[in-house]
């Protein structure tokens, strides 16, 4: 029997701290970078006011985070409140948006009626391999109506057995 009581287990915060030590973005940084990427898709730039409004934070908080992301090389930020993505920021932002959409589509696929909150909570903890696997699963069910309908039937039976 495999007894997994070694030092591999950590709290959620412990895993986050470990990722930060490895030079990874914090979940909050990812949220800002993803939203900046979304805004830049339309205009090639974003503004602090837009970010603070869309992320429901105060402008000084948004400004502080944008300064951090600029320092790390993901963004360019000027005194006229214009935020632009660097090549690295654009690449990471594209991945973050893909990850968000993948998780949200998966939650919709399995019947979650309001997946935004859960997506925001889940997405930061997923590895790129897991995102790819979820994407593949979504593609599989979208391509195979029989498999998807079998899943829905199974889900319905399971719900009925609870009542």
Image (cartoon, helix red, strand yellow):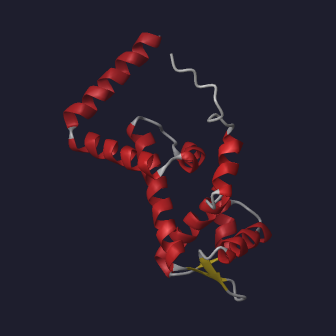
Residue under the point 46% across and 62% down: 95
Q: In which quarter of the image is residue 22?
A: bottom right
Residue under the point 21% across and 39% down: 144
Left or right of 158? Residue 26 is right
Left or right of 1? Residue 83 is right
Residue under the point 37% across and 45% down: 133
Q: Quadrant of residue 158?
A: top left
Task: Count up the numbered dots.
Answer: 0
Residue 4: image location, x then y, percent: 58, 25
Left or right of 54? Residue 96 is left
Residue 157: image location, x then y, percent: 35, 16
Seen in the picture, residue 128 relative to 122 is either above or below; the reply is below
Residue under the point 57% across and 21% down: 3
Residue 9: image location, x then y, percent: 64, 34
Front position in the image: 152 or 28: 28
Front position in the image: 157 or 74: 74
Residue 121: image location, x then y, percent: 60, 45
């Amino acid at each position: 029997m495999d007894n997994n009581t070694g030092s591999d287990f950590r709290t959620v915060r412990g895993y986050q701290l470990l990722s930060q030590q490895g030079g990874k973005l914090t979940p909050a940084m990812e949220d800002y970078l993803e939203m900046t990427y979304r805004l830049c898709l339309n205009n090639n730039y974003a503004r602090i006011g837009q970010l603070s409004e869309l992320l429901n934070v105060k402008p000084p908080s948004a400004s502080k985070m944008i300064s951090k992301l600029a320092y790390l090389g993901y963004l360019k930020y000027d005194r006229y409140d214009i935020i632009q993505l660097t090549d690295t920021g654009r690449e990471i932002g594209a991945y973050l948006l893909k990850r968000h959409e993948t998780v949200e589509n998966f939650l919709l696929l399995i019947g979650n009626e309001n997946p935004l909150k859960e997506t925001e909570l889940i997405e930061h903890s997923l590895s790129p391999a897991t995102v790819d696997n979820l994407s593949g699963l979504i593609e599989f069910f979208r391509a195979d109506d029989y498999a998807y309908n079998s899943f829905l039937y199974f889900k319905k039976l399971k719900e009925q057995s609870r009542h």
